[in-house]
């Protein structure tokens, strides 16, 4: 096997957005890993200036067609922070329900259509369906269950329209939620099978000592609210985020790279949430995780597919709980007084934490906006994974190694459209 | 109609959010049947496998914002028998066309610490400004059932059935109470292309035009009506400068109120 080589993937497949990967290996050592993001910049933070606060949920949703709910939730919570509005009770429960719908839809999309084909040696899920139609059909049905929630409560699955500052434009009648229950109960059972199935896959022997960062809440598996914590001692309020994390602009990327000041790269998403908030999962999700041999912490990024399955199961369970306890709020939204100020929010997008900060003038117009998507926070960690992953595997064929490097990136379900920005593999062996 | 080969489909991305191509994967009930009659030959979001062109259908998502992309779209056109643009970005320039009303370098310095690393065009433009487009499917996001209808119609050589009337018509047909008449809520429904099944008015909010202008939209009459119910000039400018800001009727109306 050559000692010097280049692994190059021009256009990374099965990720959302446009990026490439270039890895340079010299004398058996990984000299350089560049996740090359060439997704063209779209300037959301620029044109949000001068828009009214109420437009931010609809505008920022367009950053990402896969996780629009996350953008709507973070922007709404940030605006409510400016107005001093605190949402509790049924309106808050329904926000959790909408987010559960997005988690199910997005996690199943990734696990079945984007990630599972790697483990099973298929180019895509359509090929996989050729040999195992029942598996793919069940996956699509499960994904649809998540989308049905977003459809009902949000109005449509991509760029939903019903969430607003203060609550909802309109809350559908109770019976429409109850109509989802039967399928959700099927989905919860199906998700138990997905946890089993994903835990039977072959995982590369690979672990790293990550700094995991996630939102954490004393009473629940955090989605919308809580403190930011890490396994390395971080414990801060959401509005302290920028004192602890900063973004660097790299030449090879139209995305910004985040790092934890004084610590370096960190890891957000399902593995971080699972490891930090395991105790808050529902009993059924914990049981499935234990039967899958996951333990209460997981440091192998390839096993993120199992953790996504566990979170899917949890989200089905949580959605059932919310619907079974559904109470119609007195009004679909709470009134508030528009005022100026700065508002911060972090919510847990399927891929990890999504930070928004806005400064409003006294009439509610946006003066400045800052958005930090989950993929930008994981980019450096993805590159560092490859620095460690490749050296013990240099005896593998070029094709096999290239595929595994791509898979290592897909572990993060990177959303490059979000991070601004597409993935392409350039593996250089000098 | 009998075929001796499966038609080949390719999906291409330019500046966009991925949502419109995701619509294809969101066809949970139809995806496998779709893949039985159409060969998904080049769809990087879904597959590593790339089958070379020529493609019977190319679906193009996203707008042109870089000089590299302005060249890439010509190569795609040459490889495609039928080219369909999907969504607001590909058909009008999208939300990122808001840069077209300002100096883009101002935005670059707001978003990026090292603006010199970023190369971008001054304007975000629709695909039609660069190459011939066989069919434009509107929406932010598109309606997935319309996407299947357009693909199957064009493969069978017939015109797609995608009504070009207004959201207003869809509302009447659904029996919705008019949000503008009953609640004085500003609504773009009278000038917006149908396709969403009057989604926002069905949820008690005004339409914000995410399917773009309908054919022959009376934007100036609507803007006058908005003023009567209390909208400011700035409200009107921002309403027309949303997801279809660079579509000509919306652009002109927004400019009219900006100049006043």
Image: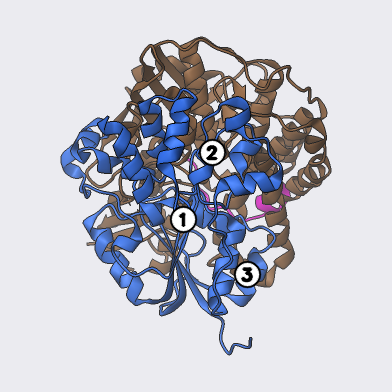
- A159 lies above or below A142: above
Left or right for A313, reference A430: right
| Secondary element at image label 2 | loop
Residue at the disc numbered 2: B207
Q: Quadrant of the C terminus of chain A?
A: bottom left
Q: Spot the brown chain and give its letter.
A: A
- Residue A79, percent from left and from top: 47, 19
Kindly report the secondary structure that dominates the magenta region of the rendered protein.
Answer: loop
Chain identity of mark 1: B
Q: Marks 2 and 1: CB-CB under 8 Å?
A: no
The residue nearer to you, when weighing A326 against B198, is B198
Q: Earlier in the sequence, mark 1 or mark 3?
A: 3
What label sits on residue B215 in the rendered view? 1
Q: Are marks 2 and 1 on the same chain?
A: yes
Residue A405 falls left or right of residue B206: left
Q: Are marks 1 and 3 in contact (CB under 8 Å)?
A: no
- Please give the range of residues in magenta: A195-207
Spot occupied by residue B138 in the image (x, y as percentages of width and height): 48, 55
In the rendered picture, chain B carries what hue?
Answer: blue
Quadrant into which the N terminus of chain A falls? bottom left
The residue identified by callout 3 is: B34
Name which residue lies at 54% across and 42% down. Answer: B189
Q: Which of pointers 1 and 3 indicates the residue nearer the eye?
A: 1
Q: Describe the element under mark 1 as helix, strand or loop.
A: loop
What residue appears at the point 35 percent right and 40 percent down from the top-left corner?
B253
Q: Look at the image and tell me whether residue A267 can be seen.
A: no
Question: Is A321 on the left or on the right of B54, as rendered?
Answer: right
Judge the density around disc 3: few (<14), some (14-19), many (≥20) Cα neighbours within 10 Å: some
């Amino acid at each position: 096997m050559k000692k010097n080589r280049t692994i190059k993937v021009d256009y990374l497949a099965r990720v959302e957005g446009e990026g490439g990967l270039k890895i340079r290996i010299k004398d058996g050592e990984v000299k350089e890993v560049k996740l090359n993001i060439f997704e063209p910049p779209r300037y959301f933070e620029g044109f949000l200036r001068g828009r009214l606060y109420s437009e931010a949920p609809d505008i920022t949703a367009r950053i990402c067609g896969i996780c629009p709910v996350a953008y709507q939730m973070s922007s709404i919570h940030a605006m409510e922070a400016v107005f001093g509005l605190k949402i509790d009770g049924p309106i808050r429960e329904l926000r959790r329900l909408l987010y559960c719908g997005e988690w199910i839809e997005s996690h199943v999309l990734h696990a079945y259509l984007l990630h599972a084909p790697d483990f099973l040696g298929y180019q895509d899920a359509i090929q996989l369906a050729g040999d195992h139609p029942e598996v793919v059909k069940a996956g699509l049905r499960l994904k649809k269950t998540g989308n049905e929630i977003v459809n009902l409560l949000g109005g449509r699955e991509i760029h939903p329209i019903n969430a607003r500052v203060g609550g909802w434009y309109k809350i559908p009648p109770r019976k429409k939620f109850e109509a989802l229950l039967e399928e959700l109960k099927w989905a919860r059972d199906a998700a138990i099978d997905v946890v089993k199935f994903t835990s039977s896959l072959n995982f590369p022997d690979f672990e790293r000592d990550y700094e995991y960062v996630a939102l954490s809440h004393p009473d629940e598996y955090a989605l919308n609210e809580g403190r930011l914590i890490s396994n390395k001692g971080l414990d801060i309020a959401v509005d302290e985020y920028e004192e602890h994390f900063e973004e660097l602009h790299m030449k090879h990327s139209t995305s910004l790279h985040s790092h934890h000041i004084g610590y370096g790269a960190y890891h957000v998403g399902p593995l971080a949430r699972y490891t930090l908030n395991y105790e808050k999962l529902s009993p059924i999700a914990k049981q499935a995780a234990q039967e899958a041999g996951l333990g209460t912490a997981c440091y192998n990024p390839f096993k993120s597919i199992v953790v996504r399955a566990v979170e899917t199961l949890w989200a089905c369970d949580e959605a059932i709980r919310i619907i079974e306890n559904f109470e119609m709020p007195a009004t679909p939204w709470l009134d508030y007084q528009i005022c100026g100020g700065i508002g911060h929010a972090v919510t847990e997008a399927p891929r990890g934490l999504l930070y928004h900060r806005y400064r409003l003038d006294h009439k509610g117009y946006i003066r400045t906006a800052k958005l930090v998507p989950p993929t930008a926070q994981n980019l450096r960690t993805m590159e560092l994974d490859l620095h460690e992953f490749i050296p013990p595997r240099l005896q593998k064929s070029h094709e096999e190694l290239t595929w595994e490097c791509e898979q290592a990136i897909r572990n993060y379900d990177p959303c490059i459209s979000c991070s601004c920005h597409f993935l392409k593999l350039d593996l250089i062996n000098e | 109609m009998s075929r001796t080969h499966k038609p080949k489909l390719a999906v291409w991305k330019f500046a966009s959010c991925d949502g419109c191509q995701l619509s294809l994967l969101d066809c949970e009930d139809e995806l496998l049947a779709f893949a039985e009659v159409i060969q998904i030959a080049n769809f990087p979001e879904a597959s590593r496998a790339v089958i070379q062109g020529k493609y019977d259908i190319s679906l193009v998502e996203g707008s042109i914002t870089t000089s590299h992309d302005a060249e890439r779209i010509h190569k795609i056109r040459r490889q495609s028998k039928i080219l369909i643009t999907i969504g607001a970005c590909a058909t009008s320039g999208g939300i990122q066309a808001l840069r077209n009303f300002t100096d883009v370098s101002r935005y670059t310095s707001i978003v990026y610490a090292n603006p010199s690393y970023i190369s971008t065009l001054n304007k975000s433009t629709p695909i039609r400004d660069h190459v011939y487009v066989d069919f434009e499917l509107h929406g932010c996001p598109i309606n997935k059932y319309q996407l299947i209808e357009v693909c199957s119609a064009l493969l069978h050589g017939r015109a797609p059935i995608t009504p070009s009337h207004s959201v207003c018509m869809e509302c009447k047909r659904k029996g919705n109470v008019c949000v503008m008449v009953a609640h004085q809520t500003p609504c773009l429904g009278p000038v917006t292309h149908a396709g969403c099944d009057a989604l926002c008015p069905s949820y008690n909010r005004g339409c914000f035009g995410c399917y773009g202008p309908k054919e022959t939209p009376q934007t100036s009459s609507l803007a006058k009506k908005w003023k009567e119910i209390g909208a400011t000039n700035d409200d009107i400018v921002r309403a027309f400068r949303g997801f279809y800001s660079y579509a000509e009727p919306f652009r002109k109306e927004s400019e009219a109120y900006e100049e006043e």
